[in-house]
Amino acid sequence: MPRSSPPTDLPPDPAATPAPRRPARGPLPAVAVRGARGVLDGLAAAAAGVGRTAMTPVTVPARGLLSAAAATARSRAAQGDLDDRDGLLIRDAMPVAWMVASLWFRAEVRGLHHVPRDGPALLVGNHSGGTVTPDSFVFALGFASHFGPERPLHVMVHNLVSAYPGLGFLRRLGTLPPDPAIAREALDSGSCVLVYPGGEREAHRPSTESARIRLGDRTDYVRLAVQAGVPIVPVVAIGGQETALFLGRGERLARALGTDRSLGIRALPLSLSLPWGVNVGDLLGHVPLPAKIVVQVLPPIDVTGRFGEDPDEQEVHEHVAGTMQEMLTELGRRRRIPVVGWEAR
């Protein structure tokens, strides 16, 4: 079925959160990127040589620890509850949050009028910024400002985020573990739900791929939208991959250590970030550089109206990814200077 192109110059959004317009985008030095990827490949190759290298005694016990951590994560994450969200806490936190978003990220959230004013919707976003994911923070803040903190928005997050010590407060801000049953419950209750099909592999893509959509092969969100009878609303963000210098996903290292199976972590990336310098895995996060974050919401997609009552999930998935890519390409074209984020009009 033919795919219609989304507008690349959307009309001004009265609810946008403006910040000084500035531009950014430019390739990283090829020599630096090749060298850093070589380091990552070397680490991954060494880890993959379990049983053949001196890493064997380190890797085997590490896998045992990871298995124990996985069990703990699954146990804690299973405690997700819609009632954990605290609208009053969100309202109280908004002034400080907007100060951070405005001064540090010079954030803009555009196109919120495309989200249905009432009722549930499944928001599908591209994931950026490593484990910090500042674009999620910016969008959730813009959503609460536009619709009011009393309108529930739930963000599906990795099990480790749900279970990590000290991050339990995130559940009070509306996060939920990645359980389709819980997502369906949220939609049935009238909430909006934000999902990131690309997961950690997209969030840790190299900074040179900042303007690339990497939703991967997860299509279950399409089934969720059809079963719940809700539209899919694409949410496209740029700037997150400029909050650190991401050099590679580290997928081979994740497979060698077994984190892909035990923890559901399919990427242990290599990056240069504050305060660590060389950062392997980004499991403890990082202090993000003050990159300008722009989030653009696109018109909703009526899945059954466009693709029929029993749509092909892969076809819908490719349509969503293609629609998002067209907008992200346009946002990337406008940026002139990385981090600063000046835009050309």
Image (cartoon, rainbow, N blue to C red):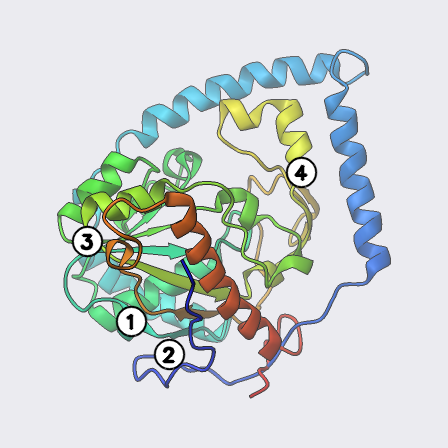
Between marks 2 and 3, how big is the CA–CA gap? 23 Å
Instruction: Check contact, mark 2 vs mark 1: CB within 8 A.
Output: no
| Residue marked by disc 3 | 191
Direction from residue 180 to residue 31 in the image, left or right: right
Residue 199 seen anywhere in this rendered image of the structure: yes
Label located before the other in sequence (3 or 1):
1
Q: What number is the disc on residue 17?
A: 2
- Give the camera-side residue of 248 and 101: 248
Residue drawn at (26%, 52%) of the image: 308
Q: Earlier in the sequence, mark 2 or mark 1?
A: 2
Give the residue pinned by disc 1: 114
Identify the disc placed on residue 250.
Answer: 4
Q: Secondary structure at mark 2?
A: loop
Which numbered disc flags the more N-terminal residue, 4 or 2? 2
Which element type, helix, strand or loop, lies under badge 3?
A: loop
- Apparent side of residue 241 relative to residue 218 in the rendered image (left or right): right
**Mark 1: secondary structure:** helix
Residue 298: % across, % down: 37, 69
